[in-house]
Amino acid sequence: MIAAEFFDLPESMPFQDFFHQEARPWDWLPKIKEALSGLVGNTAIRELPAGVHIEGEVHLGDSVKLPPYCFIKGPCWIGDGVEIRPSAYIRGNVIIGAGSVIGNSCEYKNALLMEKTQTPHFSYVGDSILGKSAHLGAGVILSNLRFDQQSILVNLDGERVDTGLRKFGAILGDNAEIGCNSALMPGSIVSKGSLIGPTTSFSGYLGPGQVYVGKDRHRKMPLKD
């Protein structure tokens, strides 16, 4: 399993040297902090709404739409045309691709979101990577820490692989969709074009072009164009 099976880093993101396509997808997570370590923010030259609080080094791309109030803690790189909605909380070490939606009352930390990702309402996105045009329904939680706080294991075709990570939320491939009020357990991996139904608890690995709506109730479906 390699990152190239799930997503490509957009050319619009200036971090190509840090994220290698042949690496395991979860190996990209520690690279987020490394990629942002030398970031120089540009918010000092931009007029911000009175309720937008920015701390640390934050880069805002052209035409980023800021809400009346939110909190952004650097280091954080936000691409062109991103829409940030009210009460968003960005906690640092976050990269957001162009044209994405950062939702109202959503929280993000140590996350990489490719272009045109949609996380519009009441979600937690921690220690996770979302592929291009991935979508989270309202209230989706990407859990990132085990109860016993031990290293997170990934279930791959019946084999449990130790990632060596204490915090690891989810990997979502391009065009993956998660239904409203679903919870993905730590180390969940959802392939390109796959869907998880609403109000579902999911853990493990979901292969390409599949739908999961609960235990023992999943089916294959065609991939999106």
Image (cartoon, rainbow, N blue to C red):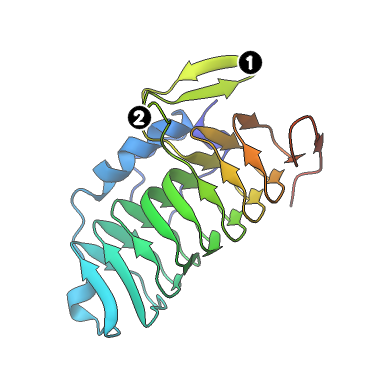
If the image is split into quadrants, where does the N terminus sit?
top right
Residue that label 2 marks: 166
Residue closest to the eye, 176 or 199? 199
Left or right: residue 32 compared with residue 118: left
Residue 94 image point, x, y percent: 34, 53
How many neighbours does mark 2 have within 10 angstroms: few (below 14), some (14-19), or many (20 or more)? some
Residue 173 image point, x, y percent: 58, 43
Q: Classify 2 as above or below 182.
A: above
Q: Residue at x 46, y 39 (%)?
A: 169
Left or right: residue 159 compared with residue 108: right
How many neighbours does mark 1 have within 10 angstroms: few (below 14), some (14-19), or many (20 or more)? few
C-alpha gap between disc 1 and disc 2: 21 Å
Q: Residue at x 24, y 59 (%)?
A: 74
**Residue 33 numbered tag:** none
Residue that label 1 marks: 158
Residue closest to the eye, 161 or 3? 161
Quadrant for residue 73, please give it.
bottom left
